Image (cartoon, rainbow, N blue to C red):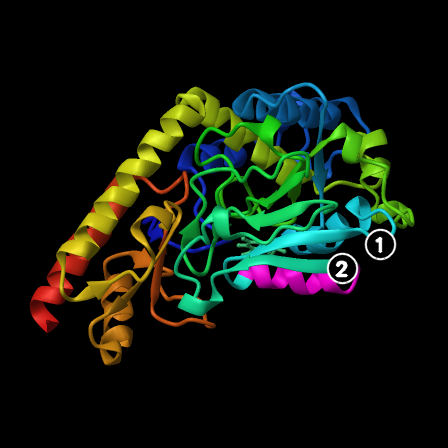
Amino acid sequence: MTRVFNFSAGPGTLPEEVLLQAADEMLDWHGSGQSVMEMSHRGKNFISIAEQAEADLRTLLAVPDGYHVLFLQGGASLQFEMIPMNLIQGRNVADYINTGEWAKKAINAAKALADVNVAASAEDRSFSYVPDPSEWQVSENAAYLHYTANETIGGVEFGWIPDVGDVPVVSDMSSNLLSRPLDVSRLGLIYAGAQKNIGPAGLALVIVREDLVGIGEPAPPAMLDYATHAKARSMYNTPPTFAVYVAGLVFQWLLENGGLDAAEERNVAKAKLLYDFIDSSEFYLNPVEVADRSRMNVPFRLADSALEADFLAGAAKNDLVELKGHRSVGGMRASLYNAMPIEGVQALVDYMADFAATKG
Ligand code: PMP
């Protein structure tokens, strides 16, 4: 068996230990004689899996009291709509920071449901930076401020949490949740599709402050109301059981490997290795302002775009896969999620150096 280094932006690479454990437990979970996939979500076995996953996530992120942790479906994209439906009260305006393709999607979804004020946009420079907060045009009475903590396509990451006084801050952390420690208390709502740093596709995580639940006006339909899922402990309907189970294994893997402080250290080292190489080379270019560069998703271009197909084919021969950039922006992109070992990044840098030496 050969496992490749998978640089996919998501669904992305998962820790090998987690996959091995899931394989080991596939037919018989802890002597139950059944696979987790076959268990009733209301039975004691699955309830214990879900409770452990939630407890471990709370430990990892040091989630303070007063927050619900919800395991939902519909991906991060459904959150683009649930957020305004649940947080807008009457005719309130919602502030959004536009830093790229995912922020734009969130903004467009919200526009159908709320008065949206784009308080700042980085579109003027092709989404290559985070606008300085001193220039944000925030509304006086916003229901919330939404930002995209990590732009998976553009490779722009907030290294800090915006402070807008009493206005609740809502963060799309689909591609960087669990990549570093986080002060949850500074956020009103955090959401993430699981399929990058957390687990398999099909699961979305929402961490929401209790006072922001049950305030939507008009009240959203039951399935789209955080209050429904909070009250039912994410068991209002059948949850994505296998995805919750694997996410739980990922949480345990993180805890066993030093928690989020250690994850951050590994992620800083991996990102530095790749960015330092790109910056030292005439052949490769990353367009993002240095201070706003993502540790998770590193887009880069070749000096000659005609060489892209060659680059990708050669990479695949070296077991380095999924390096093609998003179709909306082209170029290359290497995603360096928690489960990507530094050996994978070193192998990529070695290949990039060889390729530049031969073709440059
Ligand atoms: N936000 C960000 C930052 C993303 O990267 C993605 C998915 N790539 C989404 C939202 C949408 O997530 P989903 O496909 O789970 O709806």
Q: Is mark 2 within 8 Å of ligand 1?
A: no
The answer to whether any part of residue 41 appears in the image is no
Q: Quadrant of the C terminus?
A: bottom left
On screen, residue 271 above or below 245: below
Magenta run includes residue 273: no
User: Label 1 sits on what residue type?
Assistant: Arg
Q: Earlier in the sequence, mark 1 or mark 2?
A: 1
Q: Position of residue 274 (x, y in %)?
A: 24, 49
Give the magenta range.
102-113
Discs 1, 2 touching: Cβ within 8 Å: yes
Could you tell me what secondary structure mostly forms the magenta stretch?
helix
Mark 1–mark 2 Cα distance, whole angstroms, equals: 7 Å
User: Residue shown at 19%/55% (left/top)?
Assistant: 279
Left-right relation of 205 to 152:
right
Q: Quadrant of ligand 1?
A: bottom right
Q: Position of residue 321 (x, y in %)?
A: 34, 59
User: Residue shown at 11%/73% (left/top)?
Assistant: 359
Q: Position of residue 132 (x, y in %)?
A: 45, 50
Q: Which mark is residue 91?
A: 1
Q: Position of residue 298 (x, y in %)?
A: 34, 54
Q: Nearer the viewer, residue 60 or 170?
A: 170
Q: Which residue is mark 2?
A: 115
Q: Secondary structure at mark 2?
A: strand
User: Residue shown at 58%/22% (left/top)?
Assistant: 56
